[in-house]
Amino acid sequence: MNDRVFGVPQRELSHYERLEVSPQADSEVLRQAFRRLSKTLHPDTTSRPASEAARDFQLLRESYDLLTDPERRRRYDVQLQQNMQQGLKSRAVPSVLPTNSSWNGIGERRPLSGGEWFALLLLGLALLLSLVLGLGVAGVQGRAWQVSPDWLSNVAAPTADHAVESALPEGS
């Protein structure tokens, strides 16, 4: 679990910190951050207590909903600026993500899941079955398993004069 962000009491986090994005993040970055964090925070996919996971997921969802609505986000940014200027007890919003942020993992390869391995196994078995079936049918019908095309054979090709003569009608 991401103790760096969710170990802090949730009321002290800004919506940007909760989603682990910078205040300049666009809608696509917000969507990717929400999807990534929701996989670790959703009550159905975590081993944390259900009530705690549900609360954290609900806060994550509220942050995402607020930041994806342009008008609500603009009002929130103004309020956040005012709070920072007044020196209220609020955490500073980072302008760039820290280097140890889990956002850096986006786009990296991950191990295949069990379902993906099963799909690959089924695909391999289907390929093997079709190969065996094709060779079996060819064997039963008495066909050769490897056939070379006519243009590779040693049969001499007709000369150009012969081809032209055969194309002309007789008597010309």
Image (tube, grey):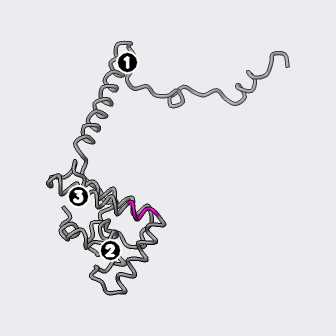
Frontmost of labels 3 and 2 is 3
Tag 3: amino acid: Arg
What mark, if any, has residue 52 been given in the picture? Answer: none
Whether label 3 touches label 2, CB < 8 Å? no
137 vs 164, left or right, is left
Residue stretch in magenta: 65-69
Q: CA distance from mark 3 to mark 1?
A: 63 Å
Whether label 3 touches label 1, CB < 8 Å? no
Seen from the viewer's position, the closer of residues 52 and 110 is 52
- For disc 2, the marked residue is 97
147 vs 45, left or right, is right
Whether label 1 touches label 2, CB < 8 Å? no
121 vs 31, left or right, is left
Frontmost of labels 1 and 2 is 2
User: Residue 136's image quarter?
Assistant: top left
- For disc 3, the marked residue is 55
Q: CA distance from mark 1 to mark 2?
A: 62 Å
* Residue 123 part of the magenta segment: no
Seen from the viewer's position, the closer of residues 97 and 63 is 63
Classify mark 1: helix, strand or loop: helix
What residue is at 25 percent from the left and 48 percent from the top? 112
* Between discs 3 and 1, the one toward the N terminus: 3
